[in-house]
Image (spheres, rainbow, N blue to C red):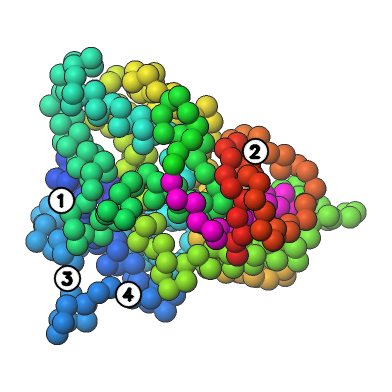
Amino acid sequence: MFRQLAAVLQAAAPPINIFALHPLQLARAMEDAWLQRTAGNPAAAAPDFEPRLPGGPANPPGVLDWVRWPTGLEPELNLGNAAPGGAPPGGIPWVAAGTRPSPNWAHLIYAYMIENTRIYEILASAIREYLQGERFGAPPAALWPWLRATEEVFYRAHPPFTIGAITSDLRPDLRATRRNDYLRMFHMDLNHGADATTNVYAYHRPDVTNVQFVATFENLLRGVRIGIMNANNTIGPNPTDNDILVELCRSLRDMLLTRRVNGNLARNELVHVSFMDWMHLSVETNASPIVGALRVEANSPAERLFKIAERVGLPAASKADSYFQMAEPISRMLIEIERNAFQTAGPGPVSVRNLYLPGPIQNDMSVIINHWRAATGRDITAPLVTVELPTRPTAAVESPNGSRVPATTGS
């Protein structure tokens, strides 16, 4: 979301530094993304459950319409996939324009992957030190806009009536809300706890989650890996089973869309993805203000995060590079599965064979397979396993990152 916006601003004439924007403009970008979520394909979008003012127009302007973009970028930036002349900078390369339910942000799995690096807590420690101490010295002038924007937009409750205002007396802890949503959608907890001394975090664990997600997803990775290994096999037996791959994609689609009935989780997903996208953007290049201020230049987001973590004294996830590497590919993959893009076993544009035949989708799948195995330690080379839905187990089960979560019944 914000990384895509950064690319749009960088392509403007003259280029605009996203880190110099006012916090209200960043909040406005989230409002725009929400209001444009049906762009390109209203029929496939989540139901329009926006509350309306009595007697108001069918599509009232956003509550932050008075916050102006820089001259030349009005009336509103189009953050969707559909754009004249092709996808906008930073767009999704192989997701067809205007064909996903929520066209303006990544899948919730993206937020899960980025947060697993522990970036949210690490950057919070850096901000806290700059605002409350001088161990790192006085903040340089170029860092102040980033400090203000990051604290106000991503570490503070949003004002009422804005799309980011998902905290309240009923759910005051945003970190707990994110974990609740990850568990509901993927039956996975994060790999870290409340602080550096514990792996436990208190949050509401729902009765219904997608308990089969991990086993089904790993079976799909195993099947696609077999397909990649045998993609050019024209002589002899080919163990690739396209029918099973179709069924696995259907099962994943069913359980993910069950959690999305009537637009459920859509708003939370936008907020979580936007927050983690800003965190990712903040360590993506050496041009980031926090990277420059702490002098932690490196060749990858993970290495920059490791250096920041060392400065603040809070360890990053040891497999942070794998989480960064597969965050976008796995988001694209689940978006396409929800879109029912792999529904047939035979050849064609919606064939499951596109998962393993040479091309950009196969490239993404190879990245996911390699880094999922590296991050979780799970054996993706093993044969496919039987996935069974437990009746009502009470024992805890182990999520792929090694944390323990209660086993629950899910769809």
In this view, the residue in front, 242 or 359, is 242
Give the label, 2 or 4, closer to the camera.
4
Disc 3 vs disc 2: Cβ atoms closer than 8 Å? no
Does residue 212 sit above or below 62 in this rendering? above
Marks 4 and 3 sit apart, C-alpha to C-alpha, by 15 Å
**Residue numbers of the magenta segment:** 203-223
Mark 2 neighbour class, 10 Å CA radius: few under 14, some 14 to 19, many 20 or more: some
Q: Earlier in the sequence, mark 1 or mark 3?
A: 1
Residue 245: image location, x then y, percent:
71, 61
From the image, which quarter does the C terminus lie in?
bottom right
Residue reaching furthest right?
A: 236
Give the label, 4 or 3, closer to the camera.
4
Mark 1 neighbour class, 10 Å CA radius: few under 14, some 14 to 19, many 20 or more: some
Residue 235 in sight here: yes
Task: Give the side of residue 210 with respect to residue 175, left or right.
Answer: right
In this view, the residue in front, 236 or 78, is 78
In this view, the residue in front, 344 or 271, is 271
Q: SS for tag 3?
A: loop
Picture quadrant of residue 44: bottom left
Marks 4 and 1 sit apart, C-alpha to C-alpha, by 24 Å
Marks 2 and 4 sit apart, C-alpha to C-alpha, by 39 Å
Q: Which residue is mark 3?
A: 61
Task: Give the side of residue 386 with respect to residue 220, left or right.
Answer: right
Mark 3 neighbour class, 10 Å CA radius: few under 14, some 14 to 19, many 20 or more: few
Task: Give the side of residue 233 with respect to residue 183, left or right.
Answer: right
Marks 2 and 1 sit apart, C-alpha to C-alpha, by 40 Å
Q: Earlier in the sequence, mark 3 or mark 2?
A: 3
